[in-house]
Image: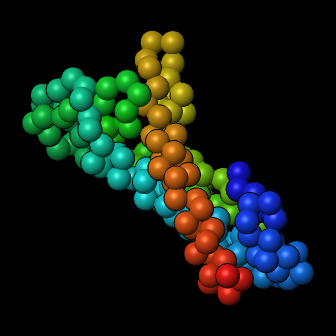
Amino acid sequence: MLIVNPAAGNAKTHKQLQHNRTGARQVLRHFMFWQGQRMKDAAESAVEKGPHRGRVYRNVRLPNKKIKRRHKASAPFQSHADLSKRLKKSIGWKTTGTHKMAFGYGVAPDKKNPMPKHGPYLEEGTTKMDPRPTLQIAIRKAHSAANADFDRALRKEKFV
């Protein structure tokens, strides 16, 4: 959660946000848009380029009936190794007004890319499998840039 208060050395910005409600809503919408896009990009890059240090499987049959000669699986607590690419395509985000943003598998419903049933099992793990927390990794990466995105939104609406 990001809180703008006068004690943080930004009293002028805080006063402007209080008096200009429409501009404040625009700032929050821009901020949530950039954060959602940053989280989605971080999740997709973690799946594509992530350091998968798991077991190597040979002669794996893909859903389109082609055979991949080698596939390196993900180790526990790394981003998942997406063999069919269905889970990666289902990652999305959605904002509702200025008060809510959802991010995860199948959040922005798409008829082409619905959420596969194994999404929650990969993210949270099961009794027999450790989790592969792709979304948590993405949220951590985006959280570090939250202040920069908020400053960018303030500059866009000319509050700073």
In the image, farthest residue toward the left: 69
**On screen, residue 99 above or below 90:** below
Q: Position of residue 106 (x, y in %)?
A: 56, 50
Image quadrant assignment for residue 110: bottom right
Can residue 136 be seen here? The reply is yes
Q: Residue at x 26, y 38 (%)?
A: 51
Q: Residue at x 39, y 53 (%)?
A: 44
Please indicate whether residue 34 sits to the left or right of residue 137 in the image: right
Image quadrant assignment for residue 32: bottom right
Q: Residue at x 43, y 17 (%)?
A: 129
Q: Position of residue 136 (x, y in %)?
A: 52, 40
- Viewer-nearest residue: 142 or 6: 6
Query: Which image quarter is the C terminus in?
Result: bottom right
Can residue 106 be seen here? The reply is no
In the image, farthest residue toward the top: 128
**On screen, residue 110 above or below 75:** below
- Viewer-nearest residue: 72 or 64: 72
Q: Position of residue 143 (x, y in %)?
A: 56, 51
In the image, farthest residue toward the bottom: 158
Total numbered circles: 0
In the image, farthest residue toward the right: 19
Q: How is the image coloured?
A: rainbow
**On screen, residue 53 above or below 32:** above
Q: Residue at x 51, y 18 (%)?
A: 126
